[in-house]
Image (cartoon, rainbow, N blue to C red):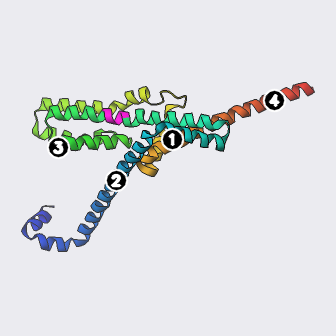
Amino acid sequence: MYATLLGLSANLMKALAEYADQVKSVLGTIASSIGSLAGGILQFIISLLISGVFMSNAQACQKAFQQISVRLAGEYGAQFTDIAKATVRSVVQGVIGVAITQAIMAAIGLYLAGIPFSGLWVVAVLIVAIIQLPPIIALIPAIIFAWTTDTTLVASLFTIWCVLVSASDAVLKPMLMGRGTDIPMLVILLGAIGGMAMSGIVGLFVGAVVLAVTHRLFVAWLAQSEVDIEQIEQTKQESE
């Protein structure tokens, strides 16, 4: 390791030529990661713009969606519309709302600890929280910086605060997600995570809505099966 670093410092161009394949591989990985991140950010911005357009005409869009749902699914169409509306609201409250809350909490800790580039870490916490990963992942570099530059007391308090920020979703999500709907919180959360993994920020909502509607259909199917079983048993008793 020391010899490699010494060679790099003595003759950088020669070292780069010698390790050209490794350098290309690393640069390719970095470029791919940057491209994926840029694509995700662009998709997020476009999603916000589209959402803004729909929100500006929320009543008209809701009425049109209800009419289409009723035409396609009959009497169940209105129920599906209500489920979709409640599920989107639950995702906003339970996923995006919690992520924003955690980002604000992280911003307070970063500011009080005097961590430079606080805005960058706050954005990282927001993104990590939205994709349902522990925010502590984005705060690890800031924690390391605090331990190497601040006093032990400040670094310890900042570390404890970061752990609390990361663990706060265990308290906030049950409080916020699933409010206003009888769909279980776990169903909405799994749908949001799966949709996010498949289609990014748009899938965050689409996945939750699809799984919520599927859950409702499954419950209705089971209820109908129970009715059929009761009718069969009643028919047997009457025939006896």
Residue 198 screen position, x and y as percent: 46, 51
- Give the residues drawn in magenta, as a range: 97-101
Hey, which residue is sitting farthest right in the picture?
Answer: 240
Q: Name the residue under label 4.
A: 231
Q: Which of 194 and 236 is in front in this view?
A: 194
The CA span between labels 4 and 1 is: 42 Å
Does label 3 or label 2 sit earlier along the sequence? Answer: 2
Q: Mark 1 points at which residue?
A: 61
| Residue of label 3 | 117
**Element at label 2:** helix
Could you tell me how far apart the alpha carbons at marks 4 and 2 are, in whole angstroms?
A: 56 Å
Front label number (2 vs 1)? 1
Q: Label 2 amino acid?
A: Leu
Q: Which of marks 4 and 1 is in front?
A: 1
Q: How far apart are marks 3 and 1 (CA)?
A: 41 Å
| Secondary structure mainly formed by the magenta segment | helix
- Could you tell which of marks 4 and 3 lies nearer the N-terminus? 3
User: Residue at position x 12%, y 61% from top?
Assistant: 2
